[in-house]
Image (cartoon, rainbow, N blue to C red):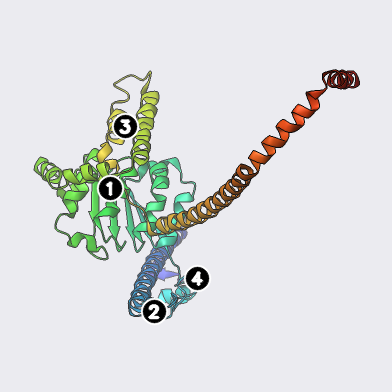
Amino acid sequence: MMQLRQLDMKRITEEERRVASVVAKKEEEKKRESQKQSLLKEKKRLTINNVARKWDLQHRVANIAANQARKDPDAPPQDPCPLDGGPISALPEDTGSVDAGLEGSLQDLSVIDSHLVEVEGDTLSLYGSGALESLDRNWSMQTAGMVTTVAFTFIEFDEIVQVLPKLKMKFPNSLHLKFKETNLVMLQQFNALAQLRRIEQLTIDPQGNPVVNFTLWKYYVLFRLSHFSMQKINGTEVTQNDMIMAERLFGVLAHVASSELPQYRLISILGEARKKQFRYLLDTKGKKPCIVSEENNDSKRLVGENTNRATLNYTTREFYNEKLEEIKEKKKFCKVYVEDLVKEAAEINMKSEALQKLWPQMFIELVRDAVIEVHNKNSYMKFCLQQVTDRK
């Protein structure tokens, strides 16, 4: 009330007006900041809901396509609904109840965001496959060094596998991985995590990850990733008895896998292990032990992966299909190449057989011509001498 002159029978001073103005401005800024935070929270909620709907729709479409393929194996695959770009309209939008003061602002928000990247404290949260592109961003040293937990939600595990090398480089201090709605369906997928620098904690949410329904999945993780000396799985401390049980259950698996592996692949894996050891020796050469103690432990974990376990790897479906195409191309090339070789060999054989038939008569004629040529010794000597003279 800017025109007010008196309050409680007292004249209002300029100092009181100034203090009141400052307080009012602070209250207004506080309200504006609160509104901004509420807006951001609402946008986050809407984005996560949209990513969840898209994830659900993708799996419905995949299930429909799989059922059709089982019913009619010869039918070409169909994509019943475009999933990339454009809003998801197959399911009703869940905008929820919004405060009246935010309704106008929310109209300008895009509720079709397909991914969300959030850094809160020491946790990097990635929602939706599009969020993986954020790993290509130039993160500040402070933020990258601060992140120790990375959470993946509504992202296919096969897509995550492709960015694990980037994750290792961009966030070297990440120790805890969380997976929720990532379609982890088989134990073999855990093999892909072996390429990381280190993992101390692993959290697999039962929601959207059927692999946790396997009774022995934790033991397999401890066995395959034993070189990380993992401390917790799904919040439960890992004991020495767990490690012993994991080795008893799956130790023979690694032995069988390595014994069945072709020799060239085994040599390749051994070569990679030696490269890591050599790189570790170069990195630590000349450094004081007290300075590199932590790095030393990390490097031991890095190169400590058992060779037999290293043969247990995981190939994504996309990479597997690419390999199949590559093998098909190689087979096609080899077939054409061998056919050309056979054709050339057949032609050479035909010429050889023809030569064998003609050779006796040719030999007789050669001998006869030679005898006739040297029959007259003097004329032959003159002929040879003439040839020598002509060459000069």
Contact (Cβ within 8 Å) of mark 4 with mark 2: no
- Whether residue 16 can be seen here: no
Q: Which is more N-terminal, label 2 or label 4?
A: 4
Between marks 4 and 3, how big is the CA–CA gap? Answer: 43 Å
Between 300 and 266, the residue placed more toward the observer is 266
- Disc 1 residue type (three-letter): His
Q: Nearer the viewer, mark 2 or mark 1?
A: 1
Residue kind at label 3, given as amino acid type: Ser
What amino acid type should be assigned to the residue bearing mark 4? Gly
Q: Residues within 10 Å of mark 3 (few under 14, many from 20)?
A: many
Residue at 44% of width from left, 51% of height from top?
A: 135
Q: Which residue appears farthest toward the left when viewing the image?
A: 241
Helix, strand or loop at label 3? It is helix
**Residue at figure coordinates x 28%, y 37% from the top left:** 307
**In the image, residue 374 above or below residue 49:** above
Amino acid at circle 2: Glu
Which of the two labelled residues, at mark 1 and mark 3, occupies the earlier sequence position?
1
- Residue on which the image places disc 4: 85
Q: Which element type, helix, strand or loop, lies under badge 2?
A: loop
N-terminal of the two: label 2 or label 1?
A: 2
Residue 96 to residue 377: above or below: below
What residue does disc 2 label? Answer: 93
Mark 2 nearby-residue class (10 Å; few <14, some 14–19, many ≥20): some
The residue under label 1 is 176
Element class at badge 4: loop
- The kind of secondary structure element at disc 1 is strand
Contact check, label 2 and label 1, Cβ < 8 Å: no
Q: Are marks 1 and 4 in contact (CB under 8 Å)?
A: no
Query: Residue placed at 21% from the left, 49% from the top?
Result: 221
What residue does disc 3 label?
Answer: 299
Instruction: Kindly report which numbered mark, 4 or 2, lies closer to the viewer in this rendering.
Output: 4
